[in-house]
Amino acid sequence: MTLDRFRHVAERALDPFVDAARTVGLSPDGVSVIAFLLAVAAGGVYAVAAGRPLLYLVGAILVFLNGWLDLVDGALARELNVASSAGDLLDHVLDRYADLIIIVGLAAGVGQWALGIVAVTGVLMTSYLGTQAQAVGLDRVYGGALGRADRLALVGIVTGVAAFVRPVGLGLNPVGWLLVVFAVVGHITAFQRFYHAMQTLG
């Protein structure tokens, strides 16, 4: 299951936001930078959310805005006919840093550094294998159990719930269990993408 396959559906709702970006003179790169700054803000909020659970709700809103603008930048580039390899590179670099900052913030907020490390490596390997497939001549791979759209949706939903729910099992609150999911399913997704690429190349 991955929400990335439904990306084209979400893009149908982007027109008002693309028009707004054009009106205020934002470039696609500018939108990418704003999306990244929202992710930085989310990571910072998550890192200090311990004891102040309503901050998780603030973080959830920031993450959803980050994910939405991550769609807007590409749509704006296509609308302005300025899509480029440089813009694509910037977008992917900022996305990877955004992923790191959000997960590190989540881990810091619940004090689960070991889970955070495993979750970060799973997320990075998933993204790496998606683009490495393209580097060896295949199409970019978005499939697998947990793509970036899925991760952002889960972060937004789970941290929104965490604003109102206390620890539910084994001493972990919903954010702790979210890190468990990223740690396990992230590596499963990376393996799925690796296997798909090897099968295609073979």
Image (cartoon, rainbow, N blue to C red):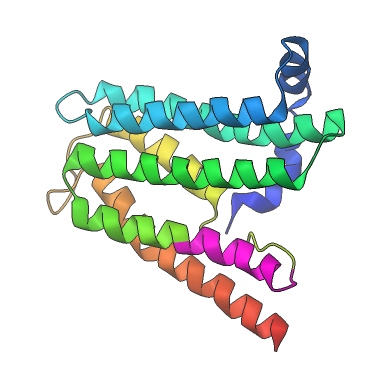
Q: In the image, is residue 98 part of the stretch drawn in magenta?
A: no
Residue 96 appears in the picture as rendered: yes
Q: Is residue 107 left or right of residue 41?
A: left
Identify which residue is drawn at 73% across, 37% down: 74
Residue 144 appears in the picture as rendered: no
- Coordinates of residue 36 in the picture (x, y in percent): 51, 32
Q: Nearer the viewer, residue 172 or 90?
A: 90
- Coordinates of residue 122 in the picture (x, y in percent): 40, 62
Q: Quadrant of residue 157?
A: top left
Identify which residue is drawn at 41% across, 31% down: 40
Furthest residue toward top: 24
Placement of the N terminus among the 4 image quadrants: bottom right
State the extent of the magenta-drawn residues as a range: 125-138
Q: Is residue 86 left or right of residue 92?
A: right
Identify which residue is drawn at 87% across, 34% down: 81
Q: Is residue 132 left or right of residue 138?
A: left
